[in-house]
Image (tube, rainbow, N blue to C red):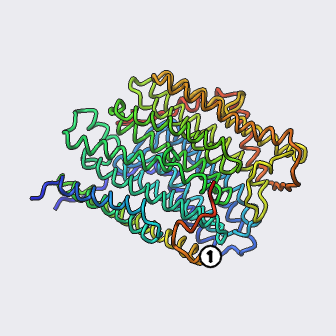
Amino acid sequence: MTEITIPPIDWRVATQLCIIFGWASVLLIIALFVPRSRIRVVGYLAIAGLVVAAGAGIPFWGGSAETFGGMLRLDTYSMMLNWLFLAAAAVVIAYSLNYLPKHGIEHGEYYVLVLFATAGMMLLAQGGDLIVLFLGLELLSLTLYVLTGFAYPRETSEESGMKYLLTGAFAGGFIVFGIALIYGATGSLNLAAIGDTLARAALAAEDRTYLYAGAALIVTGFGYKIAMAPFHMWAPDVYEGAPTPVAAFLSVGSKAAGFAALVRFLVEAMGSQWPVWAPALATLAIATLLLGNIGALIQNNVKRMLAYSSVGHAGYMLLGVLAAGAPGGMAGQRGVEAVLLYLLAYMLTNLGAFGVLIALEQRGELTWDINQFAGLWARRPLLASAMAICLLSLAGVPPTAGFWGKFYVFTAAWQAGFGWLTIIGILTAAIAAFYYVRIVVQMFTAEPSRETPAETDPALRAGLVIAIAGILVLGFMPAPAIDLVQRSVLATVGGQ
Amino acid sequence: MVPTSYYVLLSAVLFILGVIGVVTRRNALVLFMSVELMLNSANLALVAFAAARQDVAGQIVVFFVIVVAAAEVAVGLALLVAIFRSKRTTDVDEIHALRG
């Protein structure tokens, strides 16, 4: 009988996670005692918790540490992502404060679930071990299934929750089986240890089969989460049926967390196998770029169009992931930076666009036809301008955040030797510009087809202002943001 | 002693059966059962590898997977009950308000 010794735990690594987990648990109980009419107090408290967690990270910026036997990491990469997740969650809660009562679905659990989902995302960014990545992913997914079906008894919401759950559980099965095979091939679950084993010596033929099958299964599983073609079919239905703030959260948070974990897995564990996985991932990236952008082109439903466009954006981020794995240090670091900058720009932009959708959404209204935007400029010039800025940023028009994201991703991919892939990326970006501009034209030149009332409230306006200001600041002065992502280094083996 | 590859083969067959189940069956309850089959086939592989390598990590993972699977089914059944109340069906082909 060997004695079990528990290594000392470095709680600094888990500070932000502990705050969010603890506060979510406390808030769940507080919500029970808040009277039904004042339930939005829970939302304010949730935002307060997010702000505290974001502040608690500041002292640890710049360092790199790991604890729980390498299961949990804190490097500048995960810190930066943590801040992104916390900010996105805060904006989503601000959007929800008036959306929920307007649609008669106000319950305290909503805010608690958003906090738990945020904790899941942070686990995905900080996980240094396959099992932690799996748990983070499931924590994120399980809460999002509930949030997607939150507008019960609205049928579309129930249906989208069910569809999301079935595809998500299916993807979870792929990931678990992939983890099992990789464990069988390398005898470890720790990303750094797997990376070491693979870099040191070639595996036996049987183990190599397990490894590649396992890696393919894990990439497939994460492919569902980041809505990578051909595993993106759930996205339009789920975005359309989910309550709009939840759709916003899904489109930014879930995708960013999936990419965070995918980069960690592919770069840290499978880095030495880059020549094997790069061609496969490049093929998937092309499929994602084409299917996402062409799918968006033929949509008249704006919410579904944004869903397909988010598939397309996953394709651009995959270019960054491809570059991130490239051998030779410099190109790899460029790739990680490109993914982070793109995520930052995409997050601000999509939050802004969904904010405008929330302002336009009426109770019980489910048509998201593009005609709704006709003549918006004449009636609500500020909302129309906000939407226009977001759409131009999604299209990657300078001087917006989206332009710098695309620019950085294309440069990184080009430097890593993916010239033809970069060209496909630029061509699909041109296709994408067409369907984004179509809405802008509708807003500014078309006659209003009918009077669509639009309501904003202080919380929604605050969220919108943050998103739009972020897009413009990043667009006109990209230097601070680029500086920030350049410091965001993925601490690999031994925390170098 | 049975070679590890036999266990892996068996778990791969079970996994593929699960995938086929998800792809072909239309009853939501059967879909959940198929997903369970996928997860449990992975558990079998994990335990086999752990036994072959004399390492407990794989066995510990199995517990996590079991817990997650239970949580997933809890949420799934709740959603299914909600849908059944309003639509009176568990056939996923009958649930199609969203498309396009």
- Residue A150 in the image: state x and y as whole percent: 63, 66
Horizontal arrangement in the rendering, residue A239 relative to residue A94 (left or right)? left
- Residue A256 in the image: state x and y as whole percent: 54, 45
Horizontal arrangement in the rendering, residue A169 relative to residue B84 (left or right)? left
Residue extending farthest left = B1
Residue B46 in view here: no
Mark 1 nearby-residue class (10 Å; few <14, some 14–19, many ≥20):
few
Element type at marker 1?
helix
Residue A197 in view here: yes
Horizontal arrangement in the rendering, residue A177 relative to residue A488 (left or right)? left
B30 or A269, which is in the foreground?
Answer: B30
- Residue A201 in the image: state x and y as whole percent: 22, 33
Horizontal arrangement in the rendering, residue A196 relative to residue A465 (left or right)? left
Indicate the quadrant containing the N terminus of chain A: top left, top right, bottom left or bottom right. bottom left
> Residue under circle 1?
B86
Residue beneath the point at 59% across and 78% down:
B85
Q: Chain of mark 1?
A: B
Residue beneath the point at 83% across and 46% down:
A374
B45 or A136, which is in the foreground?
Answer: B45
Q: Is residue A34 above or below residue A132?
A: below
Type of residue at label 1? Ser
Q: Is residue A340 above or below residue B52?
A: above
- Residue A99 in the image: state x and y as whole percent: 74, 61
Image label count: 1
Indicate the quadrant containing the C terminus of chain A: top left, top right, bottom left or bottom right. top left
